[in-house]
């Protein structure tokens, strides 16, 4: 017996919920309620359960190592590396470094 994939409507609904949970995480960060990490954890669990890929703009908002919500300046440090054409995001909680390339290299 093979495992079937989730229906498309369930995946679309899960992606909407993931987006909403990240909106709630941003609101919780602004209001300083301390719930932002829990919202990120729920969003990641939902994306994994329904096998929905996390959009790029959301992948840069949480630490893949410790799972904390990243906000530039308070819980993360954001730098650009012109030589390597990358954005470097460092989590201030666990020290994990994430690199995201940008632009095309012309030789």
Image: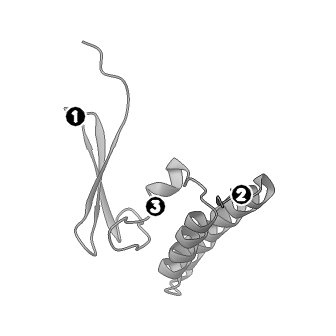
Q: Residue at x 51, y 78 (%)?
A: 36
Q: Callout 3: few (<14), some (14-19), or many (20+) C-alpha neighbours within 10 Å?
A: many
The residue that disc 1 covers is 84
Q: Residues within 10 Å of mark 2 (few under 14, many from 20)?
A: some
Distance from disc 2 to disc 1, alpha carbons, whole Å, reads 36 Å
Q: Is residue 32 left or right of residue 5?
A: left
| Badge 3 or badge 2: first in the primary sequence | 2
**In terms of secondary structure, where does tag 1 sit?**
loop
On screen, 14 above or below 54? below
Residue 73 location in percent, x, y? 34, 65
Q: Is residue 47 above or below residue 29?
A: above
Disc 3 to disc 1, C-alpha distance? 21 Å
Numbered mark located on residue 61 in the image: 3
Under circle 3, the secondary element is: loop
Q: Nearer the viewer, mark 2 or mark 1?
A: 2
Q: Earlier in the sequence, mark 3 or mark 1?
A: 3
Q: Can you say whether 67 is above or below 106 in the image? A: below
SS for callout 2: helix
Q: What is the number of the mark on residue 11?
A: 2
x, y percent for residue 76? 32, 65
């Amino acid at each position: 017996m093979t495992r079937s994939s989730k229906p498309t409507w369930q995946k679309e609904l899960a992606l909407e919920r993931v987006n909403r949970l990240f909106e709630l995480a941003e609101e919780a960060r602004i209001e300083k309620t301390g719930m932002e990490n829990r919202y990120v954890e729920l969003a990641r669990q939902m994306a994994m359960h329904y096998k929905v890929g996390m959009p790029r703009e959301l992948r840069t908002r949480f630490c893949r190592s410790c799972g904390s919500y990243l906000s530039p300046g308070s819980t993360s440090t954001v730098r650009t590396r012109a030589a390597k054409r990358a954005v470097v995001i460092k989590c201030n909680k666990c020290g994990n470094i994430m690199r995201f390339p940008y632009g095309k290299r012309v030789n």
